[in-house]
Amino acid sequence: MNSPRIEPAVMVLEDGTVFEGRAWGAPGTAFGEAVFATGMTGYQETLTDPSYAGQIVIQTAPHIGNTGVNLDDMESRKIWVNGFVVRDPARRPSNWRSERSLDEELAEQGITGIQGVDTRALTRHLRDKGAMRAGIFSGDQAGEPVAQLVQRVTEQPGMAGRALAEHVSTDETYAVEPREHGWDAPVRHEVVAVDLGIKSMTPQRLAERGVRVHVVPADVSFEQVQALHPDGVFFSNGPGDPATADEQVALLRRVLDEGIPFFGICFGNQLLGRALGFGTYKLTFGHRGINQPVMDLATGTVEITSQNHGFAVDAPVGEPVTAPESRYGRVSVSHVGLNDDVVEGLRCEDIPAFSVQYHPEAAAGPHDSAYLFDRFIDMMDRAGQSPDPEAGDN
């Protein structure tokens, strides 16, 4: 029996660098910002993380796909990456939880990939030159002149200036109930979670702690948030440039003005920074993976964190400062990244609000930062908005 012919493929960067390989997943063409993810595992969670929308993801781990894919590990309703790059895909999955191969899943969802790439050399190139636009071309297109392929790549939009949160957000409000996740006591709090690209594990982590989570679209109004009578408001992770999210920043300022406890992660951290009056900027190559070291400046504790971001908050590290939007009082940088000293968290000293740049829900791990959900609940408790435990389930 003859094996199926494996089509050639190339990955072309906007600076003209070419990496050769073989077609994988769905045949065709993919464009996006080329970024690398350093996790040794968790590729399914990476693929289905909406924060990767608009990007071509390179896995630095050489062997990808050995545990297959399954419905339980999906972090959202679909794969969001524009393209996927690996060195050695598994020939077949080998795990009792596997429901199909990664190759089959990529093909079914129309995700163009490339295998057999020297991902170490590619990662080193991006680490030195920075994330950049790229294209994957398979089949006959792989043989087209490089100059022509580079032109097609450079005609694509870059990530700076792109608004993507509304593209990945839910269309309708839905609730995640504590009882569905093992909580058998009265509901502790009602939280409105603004879906800017939320991962399914995030509301689950809150629900496990007795919080009913109302997940709302990215374009929700403050009046719609108020109508849900929240004890707290949460802003999720998400893709795109935080400088484009003016509507969400305006919403967040209304939340802060009303004194409603706030917790944000990733994109939500950047938007808290903007709401407080700080700027944001694009990182050279960003932080992506489940092995990023962060220090809590208050305790000196080092956490290993899961991250996925290409932008950061421009705020001073050190003693608390008065926020540029001075009505919010004093603000501290609470966490910094140990690889490059990037701001990894903000803590408001005079209002109930804090945020981190990383993922405390962290599927597939690590779980060093899970305590942040408890900190949010404690903040809502201290705000005096905890329901009467004698009143029963609300």
Image (cartoon, grey):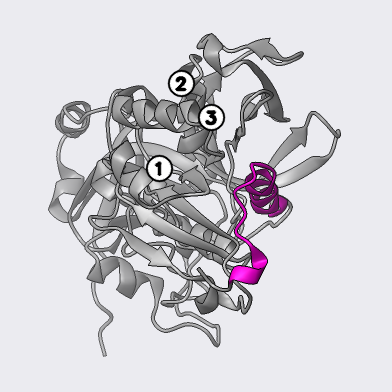
Q: Is residue 259 left or right of residue 81?
A: right
Disc 3: which residue: 127
Tell me the residue at 44%/74% (across/down): 69
On residue 238, the disc is 1
Residue 70, placed above or below residue 309: below
Residue 325 location in percent, x, y?
50, 12
Which element carries disc 2, helix, strand or loop?
helix
Is most of the magenta stretch helix, strand or loop?
helix
Foreground: 8 or 361?
A: 361
Q: Nearer the viewer, mark 1 or mark 3?
A: 1
* The image quarter in which residue 343 lies: top right
Residue kind at label 1, given as amino acid type: Gly
* The image quarter in which residue 22 lies: bottom left
Q: Is residue 306 left or right of residue 136?
A: right
Q: Earlier in the sequence, mark 1 or mark 3?
A: 3
Q: Nearer the viewer, mark 2 or mark 1?
A: 2
Which element carries disc 1, helix, strand or loop?
loop
Tell me where the magenta segment starts and ends, as one range: 370-391
Residue kind at label 2, given as amino acid type: Arg
Residue 331 location in percent, x, y?
65, 19
Report, in whole angstroms, how far the alpha carbon at label 1 lies from the one at label 3. Answer: 22 Å
Q: Is residue 354 left or right of residue 37?
A: right
Disc 2: which residue: 274
Is residue 388 within the magenta segment? yes
Q: Earlier in the sequence, mark 2 or mark 1?
A: 1
Q: Nearer the viewer, mark 2 or mark 3?
A: 2
Is residue 231 within the magenta segment? no
